[in-house]
Image (cartoon, rainbow, N blue to C red):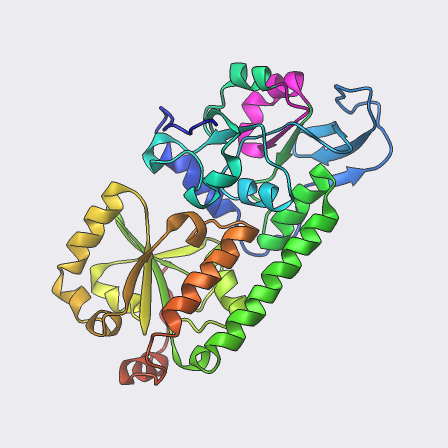
Amino acid sequence: MTRFYKSSQTVTGLLIALATALVLAGCSRSGIQVIDSGEPDAISHSSSPTRTIEHAFGRSAVPLQPQRVVLLNPVVDLDNLLALGIVPVGIAGFTADRGYSVPPYLSEQVAESQLAGNLVQPDLEQIVRLNPDLIVATDAHSELYPQLSQIAPTVALPTRRSDNLRSRLLALADIVNRRERASEAIAAYEANLTSFRDTVGDRLDDIEVSFIRVRSDGIFLYIKSSITGAIFEEAGVRRPPSQDVSRLLPRIPISLETLERADGDIIFMWGDFASDAAARDRLQANPLWQQLNAVRNQQTHVVSEVYWFFPGIQGASLLLEDLQEYLVRVPSQPSLDTKLRHSQPVRNHL
């Protein structure tokens, strides 16, 4: 059994950019196209039957049934690859500032996988030793692509064209030739959506759910154009007016002076960094925070970043389980503050 250790790189910006790019609104292309017949300009490493995949960096001849996959993006694609029934032989994990190399909810599923550097700096020597027959990268790995494609067929998933859970999963399924498994995973998720709506019932009409991040550099509302916001919308979850909007980016910054825009009948906060926890502690001691409706009613909760902020198809169902557990305990009658919030116009803060 291989344990995952913290990587040595600390480059938070790329991780946020990757996760943010997955949820840009208005995009529908996966950036992946399957070409069934072989192409002369496709990079091939095998005499076995292959499928030609067109992607951000060109065309690659990929085995019909990849057996030894190395994955360079643990943000969403690891969740989805496992849902497709493929355990990668190697994974480029998170950077050291996360405190874990793979999402903890997936760690048991990849107990036999090897760590191959991190998503910012994959370990090429380790990848060679793993002898992959397919490398799944992202278009953020453009500088490494010539080297990676010499090791094994390499396909780059886009970081700026993925729009929702389904399209990201289906793009990966096209690469590894597992569309049927993807359809089964999507059907299971949609069944969980139905179960969630049936269980929470009329409370969905009464309860406003706020989703925020408190960081050392500010407070951010996560709106409909975030992955979580899209899941909330599918589940029928009601949002405060300030968050019931879509923008190009998935979040809107607010200040202490506009902190009321973070209010709801229940507030969820995320963030796994130590600096996030320190910032939350400072905010929770602030009198303006203590005046919020959800705070007064003891309805604020810190949730797991790994499947509340950037879930794959498995994490999305875990999010729904968490959300259901919290919402069934919230008083179903809307508060006066909720009614007042809906009577006020929403200001555009961009």
User: Quarter of the image containing the C terminus?
Assistant: bottom left
Residue 189 position, x and y percent, is 59, 60
Q: Residue at x 22, y 53 (%)?
A: 280
Q: Nearer the viewer, residue 299 or 225?
A: 299
Q: Nearer the viewer, residue 263 or 94?
A: 94
Residue depicted at 61% across the width and 20% down the height:
148
Residue 107 visible (yes or no): yes
From this viewpoint, which residue is outermost toward the front? 1
Q: Position of residue 231 (x, y in %)?
A: 51, 62
Q: Toward which corner of the image does residue 99 lie, by quadrant? A: top left
Please say if 11 is above or below 84: above
Q: Is residue 240 visible?
A: no
Residue 128 occupies which quadrant of the picture?
A: top right
Q: Nearer the viewer, residue 82 or 257?
A: 82
First to last magenta residue range: 131-152
Position of residue 125 relative to residue 304, above or below, is above
Q: Is residue 285 left or right of residue 217?
A: left
Residue 196 placed where, x, y %?
A: 51, 70
Q: Quick check: is 339 in the magenta stretch?
A: no
Residue 217: x, y in percent? 25, 46
Q: In the rendered image of this protein, does residue 19 appear above or below residue 183?
A: above
Residue drawn 46% across the image and 26% down it: 2
- Identity of the residue drawn at 57% across and 15% down: 129
